[in-house]
Amino acid sequence: MPKAKATPAYEWHEARHFRAWELHEMGWTQERIAEALGVTQGAVSQWFRRARDNGIEALRHRPAPGRRAALTDEQFAQVPALLARGAMAFGFQDDRWTIKRVAAMLNQVFGVSYHPGHVSRLLQKYCPGWRNQKQK
């Protein structure tokens, strides 16, 4: 038996938006629609406002707002190997990696600037098990 192909989350959300609109067209209340779809009434209200203001096509998936990632997945795949080279390879006085040093290394290697707090989240995602090597 062939494996079922995974559906991207945005397709599922989009289908839910259109289902809400169908139920609305059938006379359901926003409260009942929200309960049936497992969302808040506020979410349903926002979907309907978008549809009223911009047409039913406005219920389709929209890319997330905000800045695009500065590094590609392929570039992030290189990060564990870069970290393995040690901090001294990037001009630091010892091989201890800190969040600030990783941010500086990413800037040095890829020419992108990340806030240290964001670097921490990126390391959790792309380098499981990485720990900040604070000086003792």
Image (cartoon, helix red, strand yellow):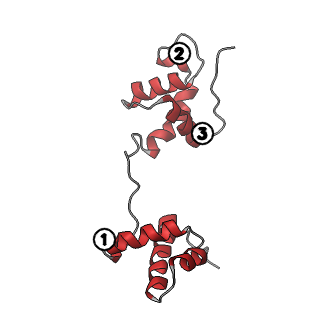
**Could you tell me if residue 92 is visible in this image?**
yes
Residue at (47%, 65%) from the top-left corner? 10
Q: Earlier in the sequence, mark 1 or mark 3?
A: 1
Q: Is residue 95 above or below residue 47?
A: above
For this orientation, the residue located farthest to the top is 93
Where does label 2 land, which residue?
A: 88
- Tell me: residue 132, above or below residue 61: above
Marks 2 and 3: which is nearer the front? 3
- Tell me the residue that label 1 is attached to: 53
Q: Is residue 28 left or right of residue 62?
A: right
- The mark nearer the N terminus, 2 or 1, is 1
In the visual, does 38 lie left or right of 15? Answer: right
Number of marks = 3
- Spot the residue most to the left: 54
Element on which disc 2 rests = helix
Mark closer to the observer (1, 3): 1
Distance between mark 2 and mark 3 Cα atoms: 22 Å
Residue 42 percent coordinates (x, y): 50, 66
Can you give x and y, in whole percent of width and height, for residue 61 in the image?
A: 41, 66
Mark 1, Cα crowd under 10 Å, few <14 / some 14-19 / many 20+, is few
For label 1, the SS is helix
CB under 8 Å between discs 2 and 3: no
**Quadrant where the image shows the C terminus:** top right
Residue 8 at least partly seen:
no
Q: Badges 2 and 1: C-beta atoms under 8 Å apart?
A: no
Pick the residue in front: 135 or 46. Answer: 46
Give whichever of discs 2 and 3 has the lower sequence position. 2
For badge 3, the amino acid type reads Gln
Where residue 27 appears, x then y in whole percent? Answer: 47, 88
Residue on which the image places disc 3: 124
